[in-house]
Image (cartoon, grey):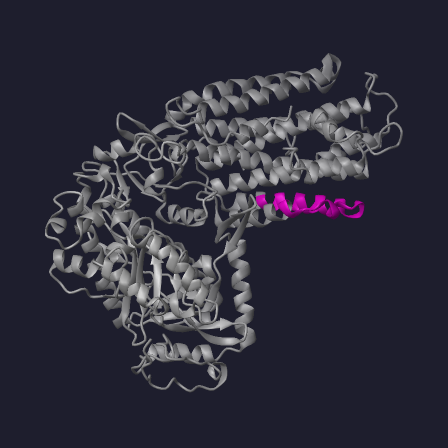
Amino acid sequence: MTHTTTTAPLHMPGLFAPYQIPDFFCELLNRKEPAPPALQDILHRIDGYSLEELRHRAASAEAQLYKAGITFTVYSDSKAIDRILPFDILPRVITAKEWAHIEAGVQQRVAALNLFLYDIYHDRAILRDGIVPAELVLSNPNYCQAMVGLKVPGGVYVHINGTDLIRDQSGRFLVLEDNARTPSGVSYVIENRHMMLRLMPDLASALPLRSVDEYGLKLHQSLCEVSPHGVTDPQVVLLSPGIFNSAYFEHVFLAREMGIPLVEGKDLLVENHRVYMRTVMGLRPVHAIYRRLNDDFLDPQVFNPTSMLGVPGLVEAYRRGNVTIANALGTGVADDKAIYAYMPRIIRYYLNQDPILGSVQTHICAEPEGLAYTLANMDKLVIKPVGESGGYGLIIGPQATKAELEAFRTLLVANPSNYISQPVINLSVSPTLCPDGIEARHVDLRPFAVTGRSTWVLPGGLSRVALRKGSLVVNSSQGGGSKDTWVLAS
Amino acid sequence: MINASTSSCGVLPGLNGLLSRYAESMLWLARYMERIENLARLMEVTEAFVRGPDGQTGWDSIIQINSDEVAFYALHTKATEADVLAFYITEQANPNSIKAMAHAVRENARSVRPLISTEMWAHLNMFTRWMLDLQFADIRLDSLSNICNRLKQECQTHYGITEGTLYRDQAWLFYMLGKQLERSDQITRLIDIRYHTLLPHGEKAGSDLDSSQWASVLRSAAAYHAFRRLQPVTTTPENVVGFLLKNEGFPRSLATSLSTFDALLAMLAAHKSLRRQCIPVQERAAELRVTLQEQTAQDMIVRGLHEYMQWIQTQIHHIQNDIAAAFWPPAAPLAPPPLSQTQTQTQTQG
């Protein structure tokens, strides 16, 4: 870990007086450059609240989220417990300049992901040219045989992408991972904003904030753009695993925002390789499916034969071009943690451009040098399983005990190709309302990109915050919460 | 809510081709909410007013009204207040308990959450949570009426929010159809059982009966004061039965429920692709209305009120099945079997 000297944090009286920023980049108080006026304005407005006021409003936020059912469901002992994603009432702010950089970087990345997916399911030029090891792609469990040779409308595989970004100590945005399967969290981006405007109208008033309300419209429009050829008024549906899915709220939210039916597998039917939904007026054709179901569950005739969630015959209908599925099948091979290491090269290969957004240096333990380096530096690295998400199964070397490291070493040696390692990045922090007052907590950012004929990035994104002091893990399953993300228009 | 101008305006605006699953859930959401309200009223009135011949509170009549004798006596030996209340409020195994119905309401509401207003959802979210958290200790004698009052009020809040915020497309129609079906069912059950509890041995109408008992029948249907305004002097079984079945101004009478049901069906049938599917349901409903119009209350009592009430309940059951067959037919054999048939398992009471 490097400890660069940073410019001294702002010294402010009042609410921020006890605020301590160790070495980290702080989104509000330590940006290592003069803060734009709007940002200073926000800072002073926050400073105008008392702690009691903030706590009162925070409690109100929780009650409202619970009442409105903006929750995810956790199942334990066959009991369903609805939890809210903890919401911090202090916004995370992104300047117009930063946003322009992020937006261009995300668009570039999505373009490269789509070109890569097209290539590996067709010519495999990138494998032939030895840019990416063929084995890493072709033996990847997420490589989908049903996609080989299939032309998808507009060449779009990743219609909805979530790019996880972090900032290092100098404030540089780095991609931590791509989420090109069925990324979730966008409902919180929009609900958080609504909550914020209800709860803190005085904080937001007259600030040049970019709106997040267009998401449903843009998504619907994009899905119409990539509907099967010749369909003029496409019927789009959202396919959900159903009311017991932990992310059901988000499915409801998106269906409502797009004005489309939320269907379950049992509502759909394939006849003559065309997809229909069962309505009170009989079968009605379906042209595009925004699915929130993993590949494995989509079609019991092709994947998991015991799954009841999907639609028999769906993949064949898809292969015949009668229905669009978003995201396409087999995109999981592109957002794999091992492929991640090759993304800068993938971007250069297809676009002939330097990556706009940086990546975190990654050691692939499947490769002998990567494994050797990782084993020699376990106490300095984050080691992650390639197939897991949600912050499960990883170890943060500097924070682990000797015993934990030794136990992990055994796992790693037993199955090296399951792991990658990265240096520990000191994520940026953002002021957060904590039990002892306003304190610095680490944050990340997941912007959402929607791709039809072009790629549009929702100005904002999910800012997740690690609520536990010192924690670098922002996942909701690991004690993370979220903040409203304010992108300044100027 | 239904009037001539809305029923003659033709095709409803908005969504055409409502998902079958949504239609089913909307209908059952309404039915369960009505059922909860009716049960709450029944429990409250039973505690306060209903007495059997021995002067004991007639808790067993609730069991009879719901046709739950077998299920109840499998768990309990005697219809004591505590046992009956436990059975109808907290017993998970009883599909007609508040808790089980709260669960059904919640699942149906979750299914149609993309369609209903956020206000409807937010209210149902909190209401069903409260019901699901009810403990037996909450129903100590002194607070039963409080619980029943809250149940009724929450149901009525739900109706108000629904009236004011639910978009009136096909989803709304199925919701409203379910509401009328449940009301029709509930009023005939109430009359059937209460009538025979009060006239256990086929005594002639007009026997010297405690008129307060008849008042309790009216109270169970929230009809007492309306009835009083209409029949200020005499409370006879014919008058009470006639009011609850045939009165066109009382919102919970069978006549009102059936005519509203008809008007709703006409709106559904106004869509040309639904006309054919509505016919069997319309025919059955028409038959019900005719029998109701052609008989006086005295005719019904002389010919056998019990048999008539039973027949109506059977017809309502058929109507429910006709609606299901027309609008949410079972999936073709090739498709995977539906995951959940809980509603078709728990929907019937007898």
Which quarter of the figure has residue B198? top right
- Residue at the (40%, 73%) spot, across then down: A430
User: In what quadrant of the picture does the N terminus of chain A appear?
Assistant: bottom left
Q: Position of residue B45 (x, y in %)?
A: 76, 37
- Residue at the (51%, 72%) spot, across then down: A434
Query: Magenta stretch containing residue A467, yes or no?
Result: no
- Residue at the (48%, 49%) spot, across then down: B118
Question: Taking A136 as reference, is B22 above or below it?
Answer: above
Who is closer to the viewer here, A470 or B230?
Answer: A470
- Residue at the (71%, 46%) spot, across then down: B147
Query: Magenta stretch containing residue B136, yes or no?
Result: yes
Question: Taking A485 as reference, is B37 above or below it?
Answer: above
Who is closer to the viewer here, A269 or A195?
Answer: A269
Q: Position of residue A300 (x, y in %)?
A: 34, 32
**Residue A474 visible in the snapshot:** no
Which quarter of the figure has residue B105? top right
Q: Does residue B319 appear left or right of residue A307 in this picture?
A: right
Instruction: State the count of labels.
Output: 0
Magenta stretch: give its range.
Answer: B132-158
User: In what quadrant of the picture does the C terminus of chain A appear?
Assistant: bottom left
Who is closer to the viewer here, A240 or B247?
Answer: A240
